[in-house]
Image (cartoon, rainbow, N blue to C red):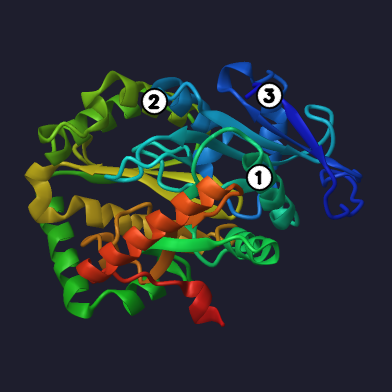
């Protein structure tokens, strides 16, 4: 496959807009381009796309994806799918998705194509300009239908029931293409019209609130307790160093999964936070006892959406619940009218955050059939195997799209 080769295609007509919005184009172009071949001028188009995305995803924004690719991507066939309103680099970028062929599908040696993610990437939803959801999927399917990568398309970590899921299913239905939701999970989400105090009172049981007040009082008896909050790069370097050390002292350090346990994750984390700060997307919180960090928290923002990316706490002070006390401070984001929701980025049934945030965000994995007799046969064989395993294990898939009907 030729790197960066653009396919020009007719699409649904684009509306004429002005200012920062998209301009009229009669055709669109799709590319699969290697990260090393990305032109420097793509950055501004990428940032503009993220600013106008129908579903925010900070993990696929320029300042987060570039350092991730640099540190973690070992697949030489990994490409960025770029969808342009006209000719590449001469028109508006209206869609982006990192994608790669892979030979392993879970535990099965099955070749397929999948959106590229890494262990610290908690959402795989493509970046697509509002209003062009269907055109994006049409362009992606057409590009993959004609490429020489084997197997089917697997989209990992996409929001279930969102505009992009709805558009993908609509396009597949129109094209007679199978599109199956094969896995779902529900993770904590913070979204409410209530202010911080009212939300806390409505969500957390009175007995639990009383216990947290007691723990806060006991902690204050040990010394001066302070809460820190930054939305810029002030003191960022030493703060990152403290976060990495705090996380490594805990259970993640013991099992080798702390960011500081690997030079690649350490470098990615530092570069990502500095990039987020440069773009005005970073928010940091901490709670300290006599200036010693007991818990630290990182939020990342994209427009009216937020992602609670990382948190760490001192396990020696676990009896005072410093991580929970810091999350109570984090509830104050509900008092910010510019923020609509915050994704916890946490695992399903997380014991701490699930007890504080009552809303849920449904994230799923989707498998999509691509053209070709062999590809369709492989897709259907894999799906039969997955359905059988789901029945044997009693695994339930919750499709909020069906619940919305």
| Residue pictured at 49% horizontal, 50% vertical | 155
The CA distance from mark 1 to mark 3 is 14 Å
Residue tagged 2: 72
- Tag nearer the camera, 2 or 3: 3
Q: Which mark is on residue 4?
A: 3
Residue at 21% across, 35% down:
247
Residue 157 in view: no
Mark closest to the chain's N terminus, 1 or 3? 3
Q: Secondary structure at mark 1?
A: helix
Looking at the rendered image, the disc whose residue lies closer to the viewer, 2 or 1, is 1
Sequence-wise, which precedes: disc 2 or disc 1?
2
Helix, strand or loop for disc 3: loop
- On the rendered image, what quadrant is the N terminus found in? top right
Position of 68 relative to 300 (above/below): above
Q: Position of residue 19 (x, y in %)?
A: 87, 44
Q: Residue at x 61, y 60 (%)?
A: 177
| Residue at figure coordinates x 53%, y 59% from the top left | 336
**Residue that carries the numbered disc 1 in the rendered image:** 140
Would residue 8 appear left or right of 175 to someone viewing this image?
A: right
As helix, strand or loop, the secondary structure at mark 2 comes to: helix
- Relative depth, front residue between 346 and 15: 15
Q: Are marks 2 and 3 in contact (CB under 8 Å)?
A: no
CA distance separating discs 2 and 3: 21 Å
């Amino acid at each position: 496959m030729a790197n960066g080769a653009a396919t020009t295609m007719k699409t649904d007509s684009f509306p004429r807009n002005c200012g920062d919005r998209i301009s009229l184009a009669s055709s669109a172009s799709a590319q699969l381009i290697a990260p090393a071949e990305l032109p420097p001028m793509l950055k501004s188009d990428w940032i503009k796309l993220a600013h106008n995305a129908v579903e925010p995803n900070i993990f696929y924004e320029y300042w987060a994806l570039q350092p991730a690719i640099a540190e973690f991507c070992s697949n030489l066939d990994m490409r960025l799918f770029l969808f342009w309103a006209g000719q590449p680099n001469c028109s508006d970028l209206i869609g982006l998705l990192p994608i790669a062929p892979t030979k392993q599908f879970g535990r099965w040696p099955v070749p397929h194509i999948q959106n590229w993610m890494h262990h610290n990437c908690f959402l795989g939803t493509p970046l697509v300009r509002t209003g062009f959801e269907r055109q994006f999927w049409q362009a992606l399917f057409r590009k993959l239908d004609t490429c020489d990568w084997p197997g089917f398309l697997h989209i990992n970590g996409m929001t279930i029931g969102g505009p992009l899921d709805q558009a993908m299913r609509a396009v597949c239905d129109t094209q007679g293409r199978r599109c199956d939701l094969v896995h779902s999970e529900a993770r904590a989400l913070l979204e409410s019209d209530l202010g911080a105090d009212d939300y806390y009172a409505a969500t957390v049981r009175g007995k639990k609130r009383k216990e947290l007040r007691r723990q806060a009082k006991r902690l204050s008896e040990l010394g001066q307790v302070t809460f820190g909050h930054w939305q810029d790069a002030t003191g960022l370097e030493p703060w990152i160093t403290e976060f990495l050390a705090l996380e490594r002292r805990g259970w993640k350090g013991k099992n080798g999964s702390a960011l500081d346990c690997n030079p690649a994750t350490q470098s990615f984390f530092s570069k990502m936070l500095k990039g987020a700060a440069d773009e005005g997307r970073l928010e940091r919180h901490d709670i300290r006892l006599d200036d010693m960090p007991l818990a630290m928290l990182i939020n990342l923002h994209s427009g009216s959406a937020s992602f609670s990316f990382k948190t760490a706490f001192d396990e020696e002070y676990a009896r005072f619940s410093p991580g929970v006390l810091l999350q109570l401070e984090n509830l104050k984001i509900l008092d910010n009218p510019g923020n609509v929701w915050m994704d916890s980025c946490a695992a399903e049934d997380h014991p701490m955050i699930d007890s504080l945030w009552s809303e849920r965000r449904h994230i799923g994995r989707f498998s999509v059939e691509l053209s070709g007799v062999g590809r369709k046969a492989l897709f259907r064989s894999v799906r039969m195997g997955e359905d059988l395993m789901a029945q044997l294990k009693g695994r339930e898939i919750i499709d909020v799209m069906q619940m919305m009907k």
